[in-house]
Image: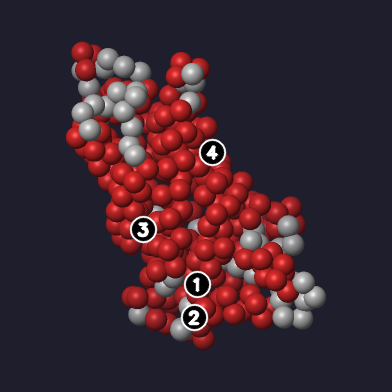
Amino acid sequence: MVDQWTPLQKEIISGLTAGSITTLVVHPLDLLKVRLQLSATNAQKAHYGPPTVVKEIVRSSANNRYRTLKVINELYRGLTINLFGNAIAWGVYFGLYGISKELIYKSVAGPEQIQHKGANNDHKMNSLIYLSAGAASGLLTAILTNPIWVIKTRIMSTSKTARGSYTSIYNGVQRLLRTEGPQGLWKGIVPALFGVSQGALYFAVYDTLKQRKLRQKGGVGENNHLTNFQTIEITSFGKMISVTLVYPFQLLKSNLQSFRANEQNFKFIPLIKLIVSNDGFLGLYKGLSANLVRAIPSTCITFCVYENLKHRL
């Protein structure tokens, strides 16, 4: 079965599957993260936290006959576009990452060092190659998928019954194009491109530690791979560092893609000043704890699925 798939096909299939499973599991935490990030531009929500978001969702369902079902539906609002977006983004990212690091390695290595195709060259690469490949693939993925995240942010930021909310993906795209034009689909692209450094940093840490652990186990061949515990260990460490360092760009991107950004014509630098004036520099980290609670488990799930599936294909 090993010869049935090329390294690129393994990367794409594993990335698509891992992204889909992860999104299904952690979507409610993603919704909490988005709403906390958007509260950073509202001075009246200075003490807005996860319990407040949950209370608002429960309160909006109070008069509904099927209250529990309504709460679940609200927590999973935007699941379809989030599932689609993450599956596409992870599939594209892993595919481009595999191609990028191989191309970079071949451009700097001598002919005698290139003995294998695909991922088999991983054990010869260094952190700079992983960092460069992560940045290149992240930039392309961010540009290609930005329209998805604009619609996703707006759907997840409001209840379905709220005034002015998007009722579906089609409704959202239609209304956005009518009121803002095609350029509206690329709102938030500047912080999104800066935020690419998060993925680049993460992969530099992850792949460096991965290859070190494989060498400690005695080899880096096709049949040698990380245990699930080792994958969780290095994933948690890498994600905690990368997310914390780059989080303000995620917060700025969400706010630039929101309904409020269109109403108040938010721009990158003025938006930073607004958030800092409301909450100080810590305002740029609003929702970080909720994001770490979401990001670390979700990335552990993603990479456990990814590593196991890639090994078995």
| Crowd band around label 4 with a 10 angstrom C-alpha radius: few (<14), some (14–19), many (20+) | many
Residue 66: image quadrant is bottom right
Circle 1 or circle 4, nearest the eye: 4
- Out of 294 and 146, give the one closest to the viewer: 294
Mark 2 near mark 4, Cβ–Cβ under 8 Å? no
Q: Could you tell me the amino acid type at mark 3?
A: Val
Residue 243 image label? 3
- Out of 197 and 62, give the one closest to the viewer: 62
Outermost residue to the bottom: 44
Circle 4 or circle 3, nearest the eye: 4
Looking at the image, tell me whether mark 1 or mark 3 is earlier in sequence order.
1
Q: Could you tell me the amino acid type at mark 1?
A: Leu
Mark 3 near mark 2, Cβ–Cβ under 8 Å? no
Looking at the image, tell me whether mark 4 or mark 3 is earlier in sequence order.
4
Outermost residue to the right: 65
Measured Cα–Cα span from mark 4 to mark 3? 22 Å
Describe the element under mark 2 as helix, strand or loop: loop
Describe residue 220's horizontal placement relative to residue 7 as left or right.
Answer: left
Residue 16 image label? 4
Q: Position of residue 241 (x, y in %)?
A: 29, 57
Question: Which residue position is annotated with label 1?
Answer: 36
Describe residue 27's horizontal placement relative to residue 211 as left or right.
Answer: right
Question: Which residue position is annotated with label 2?
Answer: 48
